[in-house]
Image (cartoon, rainbow, N blue to C red):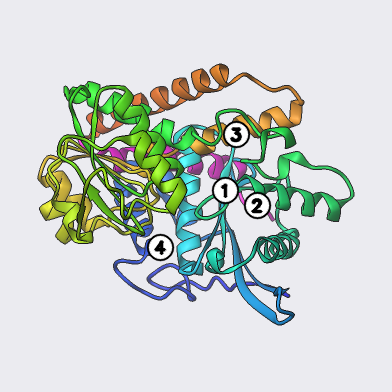
Amino acid sequence: MSSTTATAATPHGLSYVTPGHDSPWHTYLAQVDRVAPYLGELGRWAETLKRPKRALVVDVPIELDNGTIAHFEGFRVQHNLSRGPGKGGVRFHPDVTMEEVMALAAWMSIKNAAVNLPFGGAKGGIRVDPRQLSAKELERMTRRYTSEIGIIIGPQQDIPAPDVNTNAQVMAWMMDTYSMNTGSTATGVVTGKPVHLGGSLGRVKATGRGVFVTGREAARRTGLKLEGARMAVQGFGNVGSVAAELFVAAGAKLVAVQDHSGTVHAESGLDVAALLAHVKATGGVGGFRGGEALQAEEFWDVPTDILIPAALEGQITPARAQRLRTKLVLEGANGPTLPEADDILADRGILVVPDVICNAGGVTVSYFEWVQDFSSYFWTEEEINERLDHIMVTSLNKIWETADQHRITLRTATFAVACERILMVRRDRGLYP
């Protein structure tokens, strides 16, 4: 059973949003408000950005292996579809909420417009700890969720992708379920699939590669040499680990890593290959013998040149921003920096390459996958990486020029470029009926 949420306006945007200055939705709204002075006559459409087009809440009942029935709450939010079909991941996490999914969908609208992809923004999730489910239970939950949101997804409507705790196998189940329900194989309904099911080469490493490419360009523009640069990474999944590998290959040192299992530090540099092997064997960086263990909060005090938050949102608080000892923050995660912390980092001269451009490599290669599925013609990994690098560098250059022109941060510049693109389409399409 599903229901579409109400959208009555309040000072905080929507009636079902709980006000909170550190909530993801509040962070997004604050970011949009900062763009208002740069929108010109498009400002009359700005309210469009502050409310999702469609928000779906679904009950996901499944039979567990022991025969009992369990219910999970699922969400799919389409923030803005003016520029094209919705695009955004699906996460399985015990802390998933409607408010979080709304913010993540909104950030996808900005991200897709920032790199000029023909997509709107969407996001989905289920409030669940997938580690507590067997493989069969996970499959049943995924398939039921897909059936429930099937009324609003499709290759030309809304295209899910992997996110936190979801992967190519989950996407394969989603694609198969949607295809069975519609009566024909629809490979383009999701991206991030296994390559043999219409997935794209280069997709798994794309987000981490995008973090590296934008970080490399930011370092070049600011005179930061990657050779010998000290780097810390929070979150060592596909994004953080891939970015770390690429930076180390470019000469940087990985001096600290933190994830859900612990924090490890080595001033002389951690062995990335050995750390990856440890994570694969144990599920986390905790207990890695190639470095010393730190308390969780000590991670933010490690002296670095480059910091990559690649875990969950809201990690860089004002208090942590005051303590950070770094030069460049590359946001591999979505919404890791609170607005007040953004101001502190700017005042301290710490450059932030924001999530909405920094981690856009994943959705860019998802776009490539979607295009390849429609044409049934697939590119080599070299072609994928070349096209990805070109789009990321070109997009960052446009944003940097905007930041220099208006003397604003890269985040505000990214929102300015993206919001202008979204609102121009909204204006020219008009209102119907």
Q: Tag 3, which secondary structure?
A: helix
Mark 2 or mark 4, which is nearer the start of the sequence? Answer: 4
Q: Residue at x 66, y 41 (%)?
A: 193
What is the x, y in percent for residue 123? 55, 55
Q: Please, what secondary structure does the residue beneath circle 2 have? A: helix
Q: Does the magenta stretch include residue 430?
A: yes
The mark found on residue 170 in the picture is 2
Q: What stretch is highlighted in magenta?
A: 407-433
Q: In which quarter of the image is the C terminus?
A: bottom right
Q: Residue 162 carries which label?
A: 1
Name above or below for residue 23 compared with residue 61.
above
Please state which of the two labelled residues, at mark 3 or mark 2, is closer to the viewer.
2
Query: Reading the chain from its start, which is encountered first: label 1 or label 4?
Result: 4
Contact (Cβ within 8 Å) of mark 3 with mark 1? no
Q: With 293 as the anchor, is 332 left or right in this view?
A: right
Left or right, 45 with reference to 338: right
Q: What residue type is labelled 1?
A: Pro
- Going from N to C along the chain, the mark reached first, 4 or 3, is 4
Q: Which residue is farthest right?
A: 183
Q: Main secondary structure of the magenta part?
A: helix
